[in-house]
Image (cartoon, grey):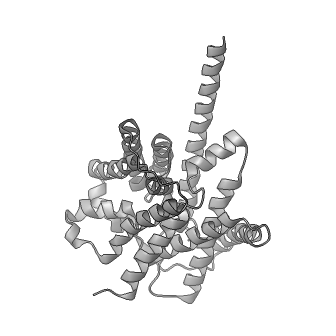
Amino acid sequence: MYTTTTMFIPLVAFALGYCLTQINGCLVAAVNRLLVHRKLDWLLGLLFAASSSAVLLLFISKAEISLFSMPSHVSIDASLAAGGVLLGLGALVNGACMLGSIAEIGKGNYHFTFTLLGVLIAMLLFPLSLSIGPIEIFQTHAKDTNGIKNHVFFGLFAIAFIWGLVKLIYQQKYQMFFLLGAGVFGGLLFSANPTWSYTSVLGKLICTRSVCEFSEQDVSAIMVFLGAMLGMYLKNVFCARFSFRLAIRNFLGGILMGFGAIMIPGGNDSLLLWAMPGNAIYGVAALFIAVVTIAIGVFLEQNYKLLTMEKSND
C-alpha cells in the first residue's frame, strides 16, 4: 500500500534529476571553470543550491515536522580527511562528481553507469562497509538550531540565498530557478529519506543481499535518472553513447568515490544538499577537502598540458 511519503519521495527525486540537467552542478566542472576560465559563477551557483536547502531545512527544524530529520554530527578526523581526498580524487578520475554523473547518464553517456558499479565494488571491498551499513552512514536526529554556530551558518547561507534570488528575479538568470529547485528538492529528499540516493541503495544491496527488502522509497534512486534523461531529451542533447575506455575510467573513479563516501561518510550529493545546509560541520570540512583536492588535480593537469605544448613547440 502506497503512503503519501512513498509516492512523494520518488516524484521529488524525479524533479531533482530534471533540475540537475538544467544547471552546472558538477564540482569538477565548477572548479575547472574557476581555475582555467577565472569564473566563480558555477561554484557560487552550487552555494546558492546549498543555501536553498538550508532555508528549507531551517523551516523544517522550526516547524518540528516529524516526517523530516536533520543530519547527525560526525567526528572530523583522519578518516573524514582521507575520505574527502578520495572523493575529490575519484571525481577527477571519473570526470564528474556524483551529482555530475547523474547528469552525464541523463545525457546518454552510459559509460558513467560504470561509476555506479565502481561504488558498488568499493562497498564490497571496503571491510567497514558491511559493519557500517547505510543506516549508520545516514544516521539522523532532530537538531537544535539555536546555537551560535548554527546562527553563523545560516547567516552565511542567507547571504548566498539572497544573492541567488536577486540574480533570479532582477537579472532573470533562469538557471538560478533550477539551482533553487535542486536545493529544495535535494533537501526534501535527504530530510524525508536520507537513504534515497543510489549510493545508499547500493549499500542496502550489500547489507541485505536482497532487493526484496527494498522499500518503495528506493524507487527514487531510479527516478532521479529518469528525471535527468527527460531533462536532457527536452534540451535536445540526449544521445546514447558508450566508450569502453571511458567506462574503465569511470569504474576506477567510482571505486575511489565509493571509498571516500564510506569514510566520510556520505557522497558529495549528501554533503552539498543535506549535511552542509543542515549545519553539520563535517559536511563543510569534507566538501572543502574534496574541492581542494579537485583544484590541485586541475592545476597539475593544466601545468602538464602547458609543459607538453612547450616541448612540442621546441
Q: Residue 26: where, in percent of width, then height?
A: 55, 53
Would you say residue 74 is visible in this rendering?
Answer: no
Q: 258 and 197: which one is in front?
A: 197
Q: For residue 208, which quarter of the picture? A: bottom left
Residue drawn at (37%, 41%) of the image: 247
Work out whether 269 lies above or below 289. Answer: below
Work out whether 132 lies above or below 298. Answer: below
Q: 261 and 183: which one is in front?
A: 183
Residue drawn at (43%, 81%) of the image: 8
Q: Residue 204: where, in percent of width, then height?
A: 28, 64
Residue drawn at (32%, 50%) of the image: 117
User: Is 168 situated left or right of 84 in this image?
Assistant: right
Q: 6 and 243: which one is in front?
A: 243
Would you say residue 34 is visible in this rendering?
Answer: yes
Q: Residue 73: where, in percent of width, then height?
A: 49, 67
Q: For residue 51, which quarter of the picture? A: bottom right
